[in-house]
Image (tube, rainbow, N blue to C red):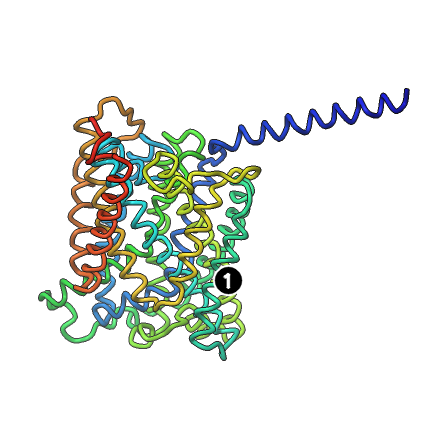
């Protein structure tokens, strides 16, 4: 009798386990909406701040060789805020994994041009995404040299690649676990930037900060191009205000959450980065600052001493880790979303069988970022801006015009203020920045786009998709 009871209990436990496994398998075929406003803002801001201001401010100063380069902050902030309104409206209207991929597909037509442009967006993510992640890992390893002064150039690049692989492992978990971790990393970012800003305010020297060189404001062609390059570096610091849109399929109440997260993130990061920038040159002379690879550490050491430089460098490393973590999290969703729609390689449209995240897409982006870590920081930043502007920023702005004009079926819970002015500012501003990058990077941006178009046409011909068939409307 006891054996029968034991066997019956074991059979019942086995049946419950099999049912649980089936439920898990059913549930992970779709992404779950678990991210609230605080989660969305922390992910965006951790992505946007990260290592950026601690490595790019010197590059901004170099573009015009003096504090007049900070005019780029005005230009870059206006462009980012204008495009943020575009992204906010699109993200609220189409809250799904993929962000601009979805916007392009719906705006240009899911069966015709939208299909091709959606593919091209994912294609450029294969270049720009890893490049952006690599810029963070390269900057992180620069600050590691504060602790490891003997770290060789190759050793630093190898470390950058290793960090990418570590992050892939760290992201092998559920989205709600990641959201909790991002909150604590966000707190470290606020502590780091807060320390710098408060120290800068207490020790700010206006004469040092605004020590303009002779002929600073000459307004010739060289000045205009330099201002454009500086604006590109500033916009690099803003990259990520759209990150929540990549996670649109995992956001609660997206019609309200996404617009607020985007706008709040742009405004908060603008205030933080501008304050950090002025703090740096208010303590460290700009001629010295623009040549420094460890500007944050040099700034805090000048105020408190070597111990503070090491402490801040450690906090910057953690902040950079948070940014790269958020970047890899968001970009891993884009190829997945495209693959689920049949626009990209279908093997990537699979979620992890128990943890419910796109693991194949994550591995693809992580591997690309590890490879990109072997290039120089300045080249990485300009290349990623060149690859991204044409199809993403210009593309999704045109998509908004088309959705407003042609897609009355798409409900828009959020509408931008003073339409179409912000969209026009975004379109003109990003075009100006792209043309200021220099011939080699312009060719890189155009070349990657043309190569992607060729790959799409080859695949479309084999699968008899638009424009070779299968695209009616």
390 vs 12, left or right, is left
- 98, above or below 314, in the image: above
- 216, above or below 256, in the image: below
Q: Position of residue 168 (x, y in %)?
A: 50, 53
Q: Position of residue 115 (x, y in %)?
A: 26, 36
| Residue 220 appears in the picture as rendered | yes
Q: What residue appears at the point 36 percent right and 56 percent down from the top-left corner?
A: 132
Q: What residue appears at the point 49 percent right and 32 percent down from the top-left corner?
A: 29
User: Quarter holding the N terminus?
Assistant: top right
Q: Position of residue 157 (x, y in %)?
A: 43, 69
Few, some or many residues within 10 Å of mark 1 (<14, 14–19, 20+): some
Q: What residue appears at the point 62 percent right and 31 percent down from the top-left corner?
A: 21
| Residue 82 appears in the picture as rendered | no
- Classify residue 342 by image quadrant: top left
Q: Position of residue 46 (x, y in %)?
A: 44, 51
Label 1: which secondary element: helix
343 vs 364, left or right, is left
Q: 24 or 425, which is in the foreground?
A: 24
Name the residue carrying label 1.
315
- Classify residue 228 by image quadrant: bottom left
Q: 190 or 106, which is in the foreground?
A: 106
- 133, above or below 35, in the image: below
């Amino acid at each position: 009798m006891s054996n029968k009871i034991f066997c019956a209990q074991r059979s019942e436990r086995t049946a419950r386990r099999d049912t649980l496994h089936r439920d898990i398998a059913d549930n992970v075929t779709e992404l779950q909406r678990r991210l609230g406003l605080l989660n969305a803002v922390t992910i965006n801001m951790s992505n946007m701040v990260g290592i950026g201001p601690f490595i790019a401010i010197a590059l901004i100063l170099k573009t015009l060789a003096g504090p007049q380069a900070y005019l780029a902050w005005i230009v870059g902030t206006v462009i980012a805020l204008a495009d943020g309104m575009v992204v906010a409206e699109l993200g609220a209207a189409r809250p799904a994994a993929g962000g601009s991929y979805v916007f392009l597909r719906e705006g240009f037509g899911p069966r015709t041009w939208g299909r091709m442009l959606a593919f091209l967006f994912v294609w450029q993510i294969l270049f720009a995404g890893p490049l952006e992640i690599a810029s963070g890992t390269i900057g992180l390893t620069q600050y590691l040299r504060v602790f490891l002064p003997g770290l060789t150039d190759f050793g630093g690049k190898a470390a950058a690649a290793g960090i990418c692989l570590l992050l892939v492992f760290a992201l092998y978990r559920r989205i709600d676990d990641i959201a909790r971790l991002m909150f604590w990393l966000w707190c470290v970012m606020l502590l780091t930037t807060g320390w710098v800003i408060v120290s800068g305010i207490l020790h700010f020297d206006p004469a040092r900060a605004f020590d303009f060189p002779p002929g600073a404001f000459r307004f010739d062609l060289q000045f205009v191009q330099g201002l454009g390059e500086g604006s590109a570096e500033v916009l690099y610091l803003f990259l990520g205000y759209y990150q929540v849109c990549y996670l649109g399929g995992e956001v609660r109440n997206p019609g309200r959450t996404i617009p607020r997260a985007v706008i709040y993130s742009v405004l908060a990061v603008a205030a933080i980065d501008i304050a950090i920038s002025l703090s740096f040159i208010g303590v460290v002379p700009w001629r010295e600052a623009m040549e420094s690879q460890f500007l944050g550490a040099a700034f805090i050491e000048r105020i408190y001493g070597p111990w503070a430089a090491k402490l801040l460098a450690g906090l910057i490393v953690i902040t950079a880790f948070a940014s790269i973590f958020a970047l890899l999290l968001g970009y891993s969703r884009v190829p997945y979303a495209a693959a689920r729609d049949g626009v990209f390689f279908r093997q990537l449209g699979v979620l992890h069988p128990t943890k419910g995240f796109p693991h194949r897409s994550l591995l693809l982006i992580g591997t690309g970022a590890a490879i990109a870590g072997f290039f120089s920081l300045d080249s990485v930043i300009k290349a990623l801006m060149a690859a991204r502007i044409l199809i993403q920023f210009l593309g999704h702005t045109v998509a908004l015009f088309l959705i407003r004009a042609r897609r009355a079926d798409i409900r828009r819970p959020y509408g931008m203020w003073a339409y179409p002015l912000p969209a026009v500012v975004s379109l003109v501003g990003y075009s100006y920045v792209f043309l200021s990058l220099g011939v080699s990077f312009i060719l890189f941006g155009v070349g990657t786009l043309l190569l992607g178009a060729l790959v799409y046409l080859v695949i479309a011909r084999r699968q008899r998709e638009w424009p070779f068939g299968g695209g009616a409307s």
